[in-house]
Image (cartoon, rainbow, N blue to C red):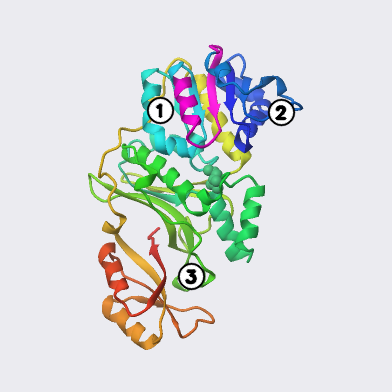
Amino acid sequence: MQIAIMGFGTIGSGVAELLLKNNKSIVAKSGQASMEIKYILDIRDFDNHALRDCFTKNFDDIVNDPSVRVVVECMGGLEPAFTYVSSCLAAGKDVVTSNKELVAEKGYELLEIAKKNNVNFLFEASVGGGIPIIRPISSCLAANEIEEIAGILNGTTNFILTKMFTEQTSFEDALAQAQQNGYAERNPAADIEGHDAARKICILASLCFGKHIYPGSVETVGITGITAEDVAYAADWGGTIKLIGRAKKLNDEKICATVGPCLIQAHSQLANVNDVFNAILVRGDAIGDVVFYGRGAGKFPTASAVVADVIDCARHSTKRKLFGWGAPEDGYVLDAELQNSSLYVRADTDDYVAAFNAVNRAFDQPQILHREGEPKSEIAFVTPVLREKEARAAIAALPMRMKTILRVLDY
Ligand code: HSE
């Protein structure tokens, strides 16, 4: 079977290397006589590369060659990826992608094109790097009504938080290491500001709840506001702070979806997920909580998921896998403040006693937190679980200057 790879960056080159390195066992698992790379599309020159005869700068070479059965898209970004992927599907080729942005923004359209042309559009590598998550949700957990899905979905930010708060590395040095390791996006702002995690929670939520969810409907906050003070207060509370992507049913009809730093208990299955590792917790009505854990970014973990999809396409070369979700629906994603939450607050005050009394008047049994070296001008507390909109209104009315407000999770 002939394969084309579009994009020869970190992931695309990893896919090529893995296909060559493990070719014998990949062929054996594929049910095909061979698994060969015929084309690699990239705008750069690779004249000295061992695969130099495969390189092309012309997409038409791939889409017009009927011998190419599976096309791997690792270019990233929306265009020209969307045009190329839709053309390949329309030409009757299976497509495998690692491109989160493409699936989060155009997944429904591409799944419809795949359906119409009886071909596969697979994207296991788009969430959680090498962690199997797309197939387990769509197959192994298919008997469940999913109530909530949440996780550490971005390797770069988890790596940065781990380095900053357990090894005292500066933000800049931690980011540079993440870039050297091939974890970060081309523009790392997508990682740091939470957009990469928002794309991933959209893909997971679309799969879990059955309607396409767009990143624009996800309340998204990154990691730049997290300070050592907040991490110290989280430790006093009995936990830590992680960047969590979540999607949750609010009732039978609607969901809410958020990305942001959250407090989680030290005993949570997500609390000790460090460095580049990701973990995704799925809460189903039959299974309860199940957690998927592994390397969430990097060349070979991600290539592992891409090549597995290629093998799946080879095995299903005449039959499309039944897989995907339905059309988007206006108003399906509700304002996240309609959920019930407990909130962590850190604020500055000119009068600690007055602030302390105001917090106790505003909330029933708030938990006041302390840290070593805490100045008299600072107060931190955790509210009880309340309708978030009302809790935030009560916090805004307190006589203090807000520094940080974070959700507190119960898993
Ligand atoms: N930049 C992404 C991350 C790559 O750090 O998780 C994997 O999707």
Name the residue carrying label 1. 110
Which residue in the protein does label 2 denote? 46
Determine whether the residue tagged by mark 1 lies in a helix, strand or loop: helix
* Quadrant position of the N terminus in the picture: top right
The amino acid sitting under disc 1 is Leu
Residue with the most extreme right position:
48
Q: Which residues are magenta?
A: 65-89
* Mark closest to the chain's N terminus, 2 or 3: 2
- Residues 201 and 270: in front is 201
Q: CA distance from mark 2 to mark 1?
A: 31 Å
83 magenta-colored: yes
Three-letter residue code for mark 2? Phe
Q: Is residue 271 left or right of residue 391?
A: right
- The amino acid at mark 3 is Asp
**SS label for mark 2:** loop
Considering only order in the chain, which callout, 1 or 3, is on the residue closer to the N terminus? 1
Residue 279 to residue 399: above or below: above
Residue 361 image-quadrant placement? bottom left
